[in-house]
Image (cartoon, rainbow, N blue to C red):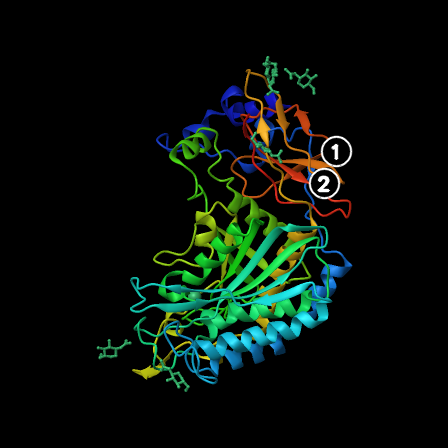
Amino acid sequence: MRLHLAILPWLPILIGEVHYVASQKLTTRVPIPPEQCVIAETWPAGPGQALVPQAPDAELRQILRSVDPKRIESIIQKLVSFGTRHTLSNQTDPVRGIGAARDWIASEMRSFARASNGRMTVTVPSYVQVPANRIPVNTVISDVVATLRGSTEPNRVYVISGHYDSRRTDVMDFVNDSPGANDDASGVATVMELARVMASHRPAATIVFAAVAGEEQGLFGSNFLAQTLVDSGVEVQGMLNNDIVGSSTADDGTRDPFVIRMFAQGVPSSETPAQVSTRLSIGGENDSPARQLGRFVHEVATNDATGMSIQMIYRQDRFLRSGDHVPFLQRGIAAVRFTEPHENFNHQHQDVRVENGTQFGDLIEFVDFDFIARVARVNGAGLWSLANAPGTPKNVTINTSALTNNSTLTWALDDHANGGYEVVYRNPHEPFWTHVVPVGRSNTASLKLSKDNVNWGVRAVGSNGYKSPATFPFPG
Ligand SMILES: *[C@@H]1O[C@H](CO)[C@@H](O)[C@H](O)[C@H]1NC(C)=O
Ligand SMILES: *[C@@H]1O[C@H](CO)[C@@H](O)[C@H](O)[C@H]1NC(C)=O
Ligand SMILES: *[C@@H]1O[C@H](CO)[C@@H](O)[C@H](O)[C@H]1NC(C)=O
Ligand SMILES: *[C@@H]1O[C@H](CO)[C@@H](O)[C@H](O)[C@H]1NC(C)=O
Ligand SMILES: *[C@@H]1O[C@H](CO)[C@@H](O)[C@H](O)[C@H]1NC(C)=O
Ligand SMILES: *[C@@H]1O[C@H](CO)[C@@H](O)[C@H](O)[C@H]1NC(C)=O
Ligand SMILES: [Zn+2]
């Protein structure tokens, strides 16, 4: 069969129909018609079955149905009502400034926590940031953090964040109004609505719902949150940043209301030059923890329960921009950033004004609450699936001691992977896992498929059927 297909493009020559070839410009290659394409033959699918995406179960569907665009609207209205939420604005005034916003978010989170039977606790961790580039005087930076404690693995943590500070054209202007409806009340509303909905549920691992400050001044709140979590000894296995998730409308009016962009870094910024060198030498540049997290979210959140497509972008963030996932990436934690599919730069980082007939400013009239609800469902599907699957497999290695056509993988057995393990793989040029081989509750598998031609991953399966993100193997 393979031989037959490989010969097909040459048949005209072999059987003497030279006219066909001769009639082409000889300087260009004769195109091979798609039906004669031999890629499938040179890339044998091997021992795997086609990977069927994990589907949401009844509890997850109920969680996602409970996400309410009306509540998202009222959260954004309230956040806008503080006038400015600039990090340098007043921290004690009860109605205007970032302090009032902080206290309101904390009190809302506490009200959500009442449904949790004590499993959700709300704290406002803060520190004094000494003067820095966009911080002229000592400034208290406060995060608002609702922690929903995991029922079986409380030390394994997933974080979702949005930033509650806002800004104007002049990033140092903390006096005048900056509504920040999209940037980033939309992200904070996503976090708060999921905290409300999930408070009455029992994830296996811990979920941290965070509204952070100081983003516009230099990612200060997120940096503090990441460090605080690392110092507390928990293991953060994933972080979802929501920043500017409020609208699907481009500046030319184009709308993409069922698409969300997800930025996922390639080669990890946390790796040493030696680690990067090893990663590059084995073709692992597209298999960082952030990309595996991105693949996972794409798998569990692209479905009828979210109503969304996820555009995974192979980049840490947009050009000239950064965000609260970056301090997590710097600490070696898998993290991705969600942002609306088209940005309208007239409606972010701009003073509210009309200029030449155009309305500028980050006003609530430009955000779409149904869109934000769908983004929240994408996050909800990702978070819930992460927190109820076993953890991401550790110490995953591939045996490269000899030239064989097989691939032998080993990994550390996790007590919580009661449904065993799955080896996943894909043609290296595919973005997402395409094949899966269930291998049971074993810590090793030998697969009759050359490691030279596929990218491998190992994922853990829970007794509930939930599957973890995959881990890419390095030579043992
Ligand atoms: C903040 O607001 C409070 C209450 O309005 C006021 O007493 C205080 O002086 C303000 N602080 C600053 C630094 O402006
Ligand atoms: C408005 O028009 C003036 C005069 O043409 C121009 O200088 C200015 O840049 C315009 N503003 C914007 C935001 O386009
Ligand atoms: C790798 O495979 C070889 C056989 O090809 C075996 O001798 C060796 O022990 C294996 N290494 C590990 C670390 O399992
Ligand atoms: C590997 O497979 C190729 C064919 O795909 C075969 O020619 C070769 O002998 C195999 N090598 C070993 C060591 O099995
Ligand atoms: C992974 O390997 C390291 C280094 O050998 C070891 O310290 C660690 O305990 C292993 N982790 C697990 C989960 O087995
Ligand atoms: C390769 O895999 C086949 C089938 O699993 C097995 O029979 C064979 O011994 C393996 N060879 C090596 C070198 O691991
Ligand atoms: Zn932002």
Residue 461 picture quarter: top right
Picture quarter with ligand 4: top right
Q: For the point 37% across and 29% down, which residue is it?
A: 26
Q: Mark 2 points at which residue?
A: 417
Residue 132 in view here: yes
Q: From the viewer's perspective, is 371 left or right of 84?
A: right
In this rendering, the answer to whether 387 lies above or below 282 is below
CA gap, disc 2 to disc 1? 8 Å
The front one of 442 and 64 is 442
Residue 262 in view here: no
In this rendering, the answer to whether 250 lies above or below 304 is below
The front one of 464 and 38 is 464
Tell me: is circle 2 under 8 Å from ligand 5.
no
Local secondary structure at mark 2:
loop
Q: Say if mark 2 contacts mark 1, CB within 8 Å.
A: yes
Name the disc covering residue 441, or none. Answer: 1
Q: From the viewer's perspective, is 211 left or right of 446?
A: left
